[in-house]
Amino acid sequence: MILDPLPADTSPSNILLVVEDSRYPVLSQALAGYADDIAAEKGSVEIRTFPATGDPAALREMIAARGNSISGSFFVGDLPAVWYEQTAFGKAEEFPVDLYFMDLDATWTDGDHDGVFDNHTTLEITHYVSRVTGTDEELLAYFTKLHNYRIGNYSYLPGAFIFKDEDWFDTYAGSSFGLERMYNSVRIKDKASETLKNDYIYSVAYEGADYVYQWIHATPTSLYISDGSTYNTFGYSEIGQYNLQGRFLNMFNCRGARFTQTNLAMTYLNGTDTGLAVTGSTKTGGNYYPLEFHRTLMAGSSWGNAFKSWYNYYGSSDDQWFLGMVILGDPTLKINDAEVDRSLSRNSFSQLIPPDEETALRLGRNLALFDDLKFE
């Protein structure tokens, strides 16, 4: 099946920025500077505070009260999350789900009354929500990094990089997932001889990339990179140790974006000089078909709008794979024109056909087999 792509929203971003109330005094100046930068792009930022221990339903109501006046919300600090339980890939799972805040018309229910949602009505994102967490010092450094990116004060990173580990070599083998229509340079490693831990470190720490798309088994705090009959771990602390060089990251890394605990995704944002925005999953799963995400970015739309477009186009089709998908970091960011060749054709983005049911099941079995090793 080939779906018709959705129109890309390239309008200015109007954001509700909700900051953890106890953090506001320290972050207020940085947030005011962020609002000025968005205003310079003809957008707007409304800043509000909310307690870390507040009711998620009240936070959702705060968003809903803005109606259609905002493009999305940006949560700064340790703001509340809701949890969901379901059976996926043959196993029971619980995970934080930010889609609760993104479809303000959906109904979420807790059938067994254990405080965890277990059902919802049909989802369609009405506006995006992203988060950034960390210490005060990490958050201040992150907003400085955002400002420098917006004024062009950053180093060049070459094109895009895809690292597809052993369990997925034959899934769209050799494909750039449309990234060759965004970047003049796309490096792909998807063979056993070139997807070892040292290959990953060299490619992301020393060569770097503006956009990194990685398919690697993971827990919230570690990548597990295959080495034939075993796995070599790449822990979250190594992200900062090697100062990985990736500005935008698409993480097909199960649970790697579980923002309620120490996690890989937030470490890419807070532990490196370059990390700006991430998409990933809080549960088993990940984005194995990102064409609409990439197409929307290439059209000049924001990270948040790319997520919204991808989810409504494809992600809403399968809770087992995609209900835990989130975006982290500034959702208003656009990939800079200096990095993306917008003269390249966008017409062929829909030519990569979504995987059939058998392929999707095989991808899921690979995830479940890894989980059976209980690397938690």
Image (cartoon, rainbow, N blue to C red):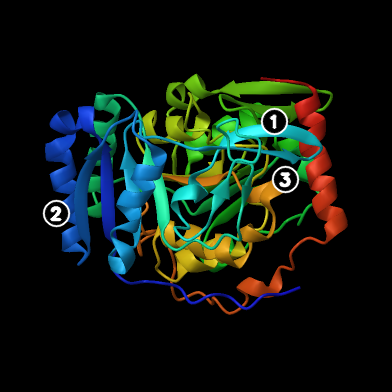
Residue 299 rendering spot, x and y as whole percentages = 44, 71
Give amino acid for label 1.
Leu
Residue found farthest to the right: 358
Instruction: Tell me which residue sits at (21%, 64%) in the image.
Output: 41
Q: Label 3 crowding class (10 Å Cα cut-off): few <14, some 14-19, many 20+?
A: many
Q: Secondary structure at mark 2?
A: helix
Q: Quadrant of residue 292?
A: bottom right
In this rendering, the answer to whether 344 lies above or below 166 is below
Q: Are marks 3 and 2 in contact (CB under 8 Å)?
A: no
The N terminus sits in image quarter: bottom right
- Picture coordinates of residue 351 (x, y %)? 69, 73
The answer, for residue 81, to whether it is visible in the render is yes
Cα separation between marks 3 and 2 = 42 Å
Q: SS at mark 3?
A: loop
Few, some or many C-alpha atoms within 10 Å of disc 2 (few <14, some 14-19, many ≥20)? some
Marks 1 and 2, the one that precedes in the sequence = 2
Marking on residue 196:
1
The answer to whether residue 47 is above or below residue 12 is above
What residue is at 74 percent from the left and 20 percent from the top? Answer: 374
Q: Which residue is mark 2?
A: 36
Rendered image quadrant of residue 203:
top right
Among numbered discs 3 and 2, the one appearing first in the sequence = 2
Between marks 3 and 2 in the image, the one whose residue lies nearer the viewer = 2
Where, by quadrant of the figure, is residue 77 drawn?
top left
- The tally of labels here is 3
Disc 1 is placed on an element classified as loop
> What residue is rendered at 74% in x and 32% in y?
92
